[in-house]
Amino acid sequence: MPNPWVLCPVCLERIPWDDPPLHRFDAGTGEYVEQPVPAGAGPEQSARLRRVAWVRCPNERGEPHHLPASYGESGPPLVFGMVGASGSGKTHLLTAMIGAVERGDLHRHYGQACWPLEMRLHQEYLRDNVGPLAGEARELRPTPPGRVMFADGFMVAQGEGPPRPVALFDVAGDDLLRVADATAFLDAADGLIFVVDPVRLDEAGGRDRTFGVVLDLLRASGRLPEVSAAVVVAKADLLRFEDPLALWLRRDTAALDPEESLSESADVYAYLHGRGAHAWTRPYRECARATLHVASATGSGSVRGDGDGTGDARFPRGVHPRRVLRPLVSLLAMSGALASPEAERIGI
Ligand SMILES: Nc1nc2c(ncn2[C@@H]2O[C@H](COP(=O)(O)OP(=O)(O)O)[C@@H](O)[C@H]2O)c(=O)[nH]1
Ligand SMILES: [Mg+2]
Ligand SMILES: [Zn+2]
């Protein structure tokens, strides 16, 4: 029995879902076109059409978007987002993560089949983010402030199990409190990736206000016990002389191992604690399940294209992401989308 209402993973509004009209995605034009089931279609033909069909979200605000026709039966979406001050590296990390999913790493290493949740937005994300960063080693522009943006999403499925929608949001950090969509996002969030900027660890107070703001809002709405957290020390290529973080960054195992996850978490916790950065470890102490990670979205720093500092910045040594998928895999494990005896022990 399909649900009469579902949560749209793109605009985060509750939308009615009662035998909605079907569309198909035209790869040639990159647009969705209406595709009614022909009047005389038998049950097999209409089932076949439905399997590849899309439904337009009735929410008229913002860009039009579509969901797989099977969405009504797929269960609620998992909503994940990035939290951290502006400039901490959220957009580059999310882009590197989605690049790794797009390359098939979730399937190859973790047995999760994935396909796009929204074709047009997915193609736009690849064109605007993954392509420039991974393909051309170009630095991405700063995210416009004051927005909580759907970045990309996919359906994940394990074995014969039902697929689960996963939506990834790029949150512009500093002004979360002032953003109206932030409330909708925090009411829906199942998992948060808290991004620690190592460059700012030595700043006065050594704390990121955004972490506390988000945790306080979640506590006030009573949702803290439902939210998993992955705290990531990003840009870890900058910490290449700081053992044991540097050792973790060089490791390249790709398997879900609760012992490894626990010892990486313990090392990162001790490192942040040792630098007096207590506010950065708050998600670990307060969220229901949490892990800590080391990652680098790019593997090295960017430089401005020309001498006068106006050209586009690039990564002259190329872009070599390290351990970027693990925070996402941990969230999938902690929220039950990735199910295994190992997954059950992640983040507890
Ligand atoms: N060295 C290094 N710099 C990074 C890395 N990721 C991002 N940066 C730089 O950090 C800055 C801010 O990154 P961005 O992802 O836009 O941060 P956001 O505002 O949190 O989304 C940019 O100048 C990036 O070049 C990384 O893994 N290593
Ligand atoms: Mg950003
Ligand atoms: Zn929508």
Image: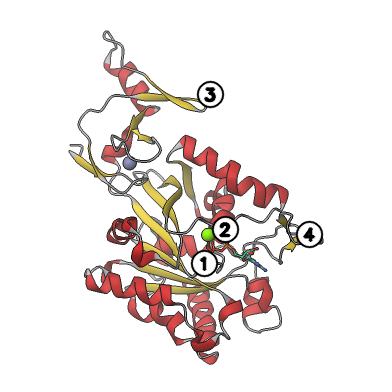
Mark 4 — residue?
Answer: 316
User: Where 206 falls versus 110 (above or below)?
Assistant: below
Mark 1 or mark 4: name the one nearer the start of the chain: 1
Q: Is mark 2 within 8 Å of ligand 1?
A: yes
User: Dot 4 surroundings within 10 Å: few (below 14), some, or many (20 or more)?
Assistant: some
Mark 3 — residue?
Answer: 29
Q: What secondary structure is found at the residue carrying circle 2?
A: loop
Colouring method of the image? secondary structure
Mark 1 — residue?
Answer: 86
Mark 3 or mark 4: name the one nearer the start of the chain: 3
Mark 2 or mark 1: name the one nearer the start of the chain: 1
Q: Residue at x 29, y 38 (%)?
A: 59
Which is closer to the viewer, label 2 or label 4?
A: 2
User: Which percent across, then down, holds residue 276?
Assistant: 51, 91
Left/right of residue 298 with respect to residue 213 in the rendered view: right
Q: Check whether the beta carbons of the residues at disc 3 and disc 1 lie within 8 A of each other.
A: no
Which is closer to the viewer, label 1 or label 4?
A: 1
Ligand 1 image position (quadrant): bottom right
Amino acid carrying mark 1 in the image: Ser
Which of 61 and 94 lies nearest the eye of the viewer? 61
Q: What secondary structure is found at the residue carrying circle 4?
A: loop
Q: Is mark 1 within 8 Å of ligand 1?
A: yes
Mark 2 or mark 3: name the one nearer the start of the chain: 3
User: Which percent across, then down, holds residue 206?
Assistant: 51, 85
Q: What secondary structure is found at the residue carrying circle 3?
A: loop
Residues at marks 1 and 4, CA–CA distance in whole angstroms = 23 Å
Left/right of residue 303 with respect to residue 345 in the rendered view: right
Q: What secondary structure is found at the residue carrying circle 1?
A: loop
Q: Residue at x 54, y 38 (%)?
A: 123
User: Is residue 158 visible to us here?
Assistant: no
Left/right of residue 3 with respect to residue 33 in the rendered view: left
User: Which percent across, then down, holds residue 318?
Assistant: 75, 57
